[in-house]
C-alpha cells in the first residue's frame, strides 16, 4: 500500500526528551529549503492536506485489518469444522460470509498482486493505493496542492466514507446473522 509520511512545515517547535525522571526541552526551528520555490503558506496548505490523507489512509488500513481478522476467523472456523459432517450448513454460511468480506476488501486493496512485477499494469489500484498515490504526488514538491488534487481527495474521501458505511452494514447485519 505504501506509507504516508508528513514532514513538519517551517516553524518553531519545542522538542521534549524524557530520560527516567528527567525531562529536557529545547526549541527547534525548521527552516524552509532555500531552493524551494514554494512559499511557507503553500507548504502549510500541502501539509494540511497530506495530514488529512494520512488520516484517510489510517482509516482504510484499519478497515483492511478488520476484514483480514474476520476472514481469518472464518477460515479457522472452516478448518475446525472440516471433518464435522453435521456442520455443513455452518461451513457453507461461513464460506458465503467470507466471500462477502473478501469482495469488500477488494474495494480497498488489490488482492491479486503477486509482488513479482508489473502488478500495477495487470490489476487496477484500489482505494488505499489511490490515496497513497495521491499523497506521493502532493508530497513531491513544496507547492500547494492543485485544485485537481484537492478534488480527487474529496472523491476518495467520499468513497472511503461509503466503504466504512458498507463495512458497518456487513459486520452489523451479515456477521450478526451468521453469529445467530
Image (cartoon, rainbow, N blue to C red):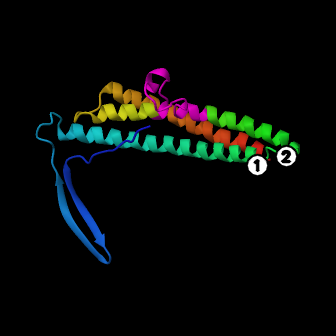
Q: Quadrant of residue 19?
A: bottom left
In the foreground, 8 or 12: 8
Q: CA distance from mark 1 to mark 2?
A: 8 Å
Would you say 99 lies left or right of 150 here? right
Residue at 61% x, 47% y is 69
Highlighted range, magenta: 104-128
Task: Rate crowding at label 2 as few (under 14), some (14 to 19) or many (20 or more) other CA atoms within 10 Å.
Answer: few
Q: Is residue 97 visible?
A: yes
Would you say 51 lies left or right of 29 here? right
Q: Are marks 1 and 2 in contact (CB under 8 Å)?
A: yes
Q: How many marks?
A: 2
Q: Is residue 157 visible?
A: no
Residue occupying the far bottom of the picture: 21
In the foreground, 154 or 23: 23
Residue at 34% x, 44% y is 5
| 34 falls in the magenta region | no
Place of residue 161 in the rendered image (x, y in percent of width and height, measured from the top left)? 53, 36
Residue occupying the far left of the picture: 34
Residue occupying the far right of the picture: 86
| Residue 25, above or below 158 | below
| 125 falls in the magenta region | yes
Residue that mark 1 sits on: 80
Q: Which mark is residue 84?
A: 2
Residue at 79% x, 40% y is 91
Of helix, strand and loop, which one carries label 1? helix
Amino acid at each position: 500500500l505504501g506509507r504516508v509520511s508528513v514532514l513538519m512545515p517551517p516553524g518553531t517547535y519545542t522538542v521534549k526528551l524524557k530520560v527516567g525522571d528527567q525531562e529536557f526541552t529545547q526549541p527547534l526551528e525548521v527552516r524552509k529549503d532555500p531552493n524551494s520555490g514554494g512559499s511557507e503558506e503553500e507548504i502549510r496548505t500541502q501539509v494540511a492536506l497530506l495530514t488529512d490523507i494520512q488520516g484517510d489512509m489510517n482509516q482504510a488500513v484499519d478497515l483492511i485489518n478488520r476484514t483480514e481478522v474476520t476472514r481469518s476467523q472464518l477460515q479457522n472456523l472452516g478448518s475446525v469444522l472440516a471433518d464435522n459432517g453435521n456442520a455443513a450448513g455452518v461451513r457453507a454460511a461461513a464460506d458465503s460470509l467470507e466471500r462477502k468480506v473478501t469482495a469488500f476488501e477488494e474495494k480497498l486493496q488489490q488482492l491479486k498482486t503477486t509482488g513479482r512485477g508489473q502488478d500495477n499494469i495487470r490489476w487496477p489500484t484500489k482505494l488505499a493505493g489511490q490515496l497513497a498515490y495521491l499523497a506521493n504526488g502532493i508530497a513531491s514538491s513544496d507547492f500547494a496542492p492543485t485544485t485537481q488534487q484537492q478534488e480527487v481527495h474529496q472523491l476518495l474521501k467520499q468513497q472511503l466514507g461509503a466503504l466504512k458505511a458498507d463495512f458497518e452494514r456487513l459486520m452489523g447485519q451479515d456477521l450478526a446473522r451468521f453469529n445467530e
